[in-house]
Image: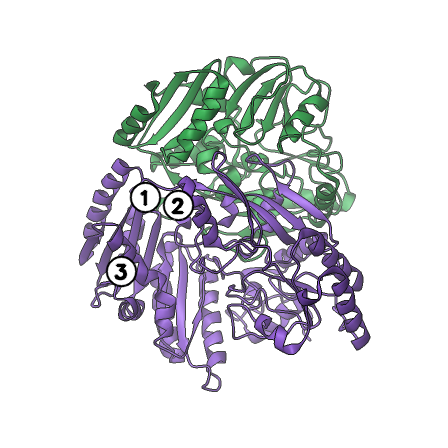
Chain colours: A purple, B green
Amino acid sequence: MQIKPLSNDEKKSLIRRLRLILPQEAVLHLDEDLRPYECDGLSAYRNLPLVVALPSNIDQVQAILKLCYELEVPVVARGAGTGLSGGALPHSDGVLLSLAKFKDILNIDPVQRTAVVQPGVRNLAISEAADQFGLYYAPDPSSQIACTIGGNIAENSGGVHCLKYGLTVHNIQQLKMVTMQGELVTLGGTGLDAPGFDLLALMTGSEGMLGVFVEATVKLLPKPQIAKAILAAFDDVVKAGAAVGDIISAGIIPAGLEMMDKLAIKAAEEFVHAGYPLDAEAILLCELDGCDTEVAEHVERVKVLLEQGGATEVRVAKDDNERMTFWKGRKAAFPAVGRLSPDYYCMDGTIPRKHLPRVLKTMGELSTEYNLPVANVFHAGDGNLHPLILYDANIPGELERTEEFGGKILQLCVEVGGSITGEHGVGLEKINQMCIQFKTGELTQFHAIKNAFDAKGLLNPGKAVPTLHRCAEFGAMHVHNGELSHPELERF
Amino acid sequence: MSDITQKLQQQVAQAYSASSPLKICGGGSKDFYGRKIQGDIIDVSGHSGIISYEPTELVITARAGTPLSEIENNLDEKGQMLGFEPPHFSNAATLGGTIACNLSGPRRPYRGAARDYVLGSTIINGKAEKLHFGGEVMKNVAGYDVSRLMCGSLGTLGLLLDISLKVIPKPEAESTVILECDIQTAIDKMHLWMQQSLPLSASSYADGKLYVRLASNEASIKLAHQNMGGELHKDIEYWQQLKEQQLAFFDTKKPVWRLSLASNAPPLKLQGDTVYDWGGALRWLRSDESADKIRHAVEALGGHAMLFRNNVNQLDTFHELSSGIHTMHRQLKLAFDPANILNPGRMYADI
């Protein structure tokens, strides 16, 4: 459905009616008040909303959505705004619905090992609150200090520990959601499953397109008895990639298995002095956790596997301090790379791990072709790439070249059987690449799903799933292997 | 081992144009599950074979008609397994039926359900369109998660053609601690142990005995056992019998209910006998009690009750949905199957 811009009178009426629902200070509409909401973590894309609404309870959220449904005004939900794909980019004619005031942890049940939280609770705050019971919340996106659980669910966030402990979708038990019509529904239940379709799975990662989350029950895990970290250096990235396969085929699932290439190592080392070997072409960081005796045995086996796999150096952290130092460099990799260049562009395509050599080689060639350096940080265990393209937005045309380069990397991920996004979401950033990932049939099915929940198309319009028209235009620009994508569509 | 996609697609296309319902069948091992429906049989069992299996990638992709046993045997040869320990209920069980029903075995609370392992799928929707969602990678957030939505939807949204699953390594060793105690003690112990980061892989209570399976290396199992008490047993048949419903408990003509609720919920005051699985979160109730009474008791605790076996009076199998959620089901059904031809009525009268 086409969104109609509001007339000035309609805008005034919307603000007036929002003020009947919310206190004066919770409805922002002056430019200077709207400015902090103009973008999310993908700051290259900016747009001011018509109005920002800051509800503090579920009744208010329901009333706002009912109002917007009636007036046919778009709604974009927002948590902490740390998303990296422009998913929370405001709509010029719409309400930016901030869930920032929903920041209470409502209950922690140490026996059932669950936490009931409001959507604006920070990811790390859950683990901090559960710590007194020896429990924690497993998914740990790098932005966990700031990002909120509502956004994590909307994006199905991952993190360095998801190879062993799963993504957000594996760690959510119940979700309260308000529909675009303003109805409050509960998905999931107190048990491990619920009757009917798995709506909990459908909502997780739905990027604010199907409903607004207002409360979640998340699963907590007992903290492992012990965690050990191993750092291995390689003189060849291909050998490092192969070593990952060796560990996994030996029947060992590490809690985290990360890889960094030379440029990323150099950046991280200069930034936090983690003691990384600067002469290495790649390093692997492998964390093993669980019961004492099992971890001890696995550490020995992994050491041998890494050495057999051609590691030039293998270090086991002697204590938790050294383990944290190993991780410090990896966790600071993005800001560290940020120091090398005025701007960087981070992608998150995933690939079957076996194609790593081909993908890295092609990425190197593209880097030369575009004359833009790339640092690679990689969730190696689960095939999630994080190429960071270094560029300078002040140089005219460089952002556009960077985006084009990034688009080619994502296209390559799809070609080898992977995905354009492993954890950051499509948002607005990768909307064109969705046309490469999916054909007309799948996209049409996605639109039918959207229509089932939001027939007026008011929730986060223009994000996550491209229109077929958009794909036709994009396809006309990007003819792949001589084949026009979506040839059945009329060209405009 | 063959690919009969075209034939299946043609049959769905014919049914779509004639608006005539189809009943999707695989091996028939779970024919009893769900509401009884009418429709022309569309047989997926011939669409079979493992398409790819890469142990180092921890991923297997197979056609829906592939026997579950064939998949498990292939994984076993490489020291891997399906983490959700699916029940077969007969030798004919197929992968498609397993995923369409989303049934998981005793390992479920500790390693996840069938839906947690689904990475991708190819389906035929109700308009006879062949569609592919997800893929063979562990992380993929492009588009809505249709593959997981298929899991447990009983073929009412789409006919599954092939499925990609994450697989996990088999544990080095497994042993079971058996302890005689009353049910409340058992519930307390299962929760206490779960909070302690012990290597649990199943816990169940039946006939006055608590069974807790440990999966790790021998040394860790021994240590855990010292902490837990009871007797340690290797290679017992209990878990297989529980999973396949071959315990004497299931040899009955009475209705058998599947209750899913908070694991630490107290024993329900309902007439009949109960076997506990999933650390208390799944309870099999053998009872002549009225459906209303059972459903109310479970619902009061935030759970749901399913009439799993011996549905002699042809009652609804699944727990009633709230009206808001039911409407979403109707809308989704329409979005995938506008002519209402795929297993119509298998889940609810209008789904």
Q: Are marks 2 and 3 on the same chain?
A: yes
Amino acid beneath label 1: Asp
Amino acid beneath label 3: Ile
Quarter of the image for residue A437 reads bottom right
Residue bearing the label numbered 2: A164
Q: Nearer the viewer, residue A223 or A392?
A: A223
Q: Of callouts 1 and 2, which one flags the residue occurring earlier in the amino acid sequence?
A: 2
Amino acid beneath label 2: Lys
Q: Residues within 10 Å of mark 3 (few under 14, many from 20)?
A: many
Q: x and y percent of residue A481 in the render? A: 50, 69
> Does A144 sit left or right of A426 as displayed?
left
The answer to whether any part of residue A388 appears in the image is yes
Q: x and y percent of residue B233 in the render? A: 33, 19
Residue bearing the label numbered 3: A283
Q: Pointer 2 indicates a residue of which chain?
A: A
Q: Disc 3 on helix, strand or loop?
A: strand
Q: Disc 2 on helix, strand or loop?
A: helix
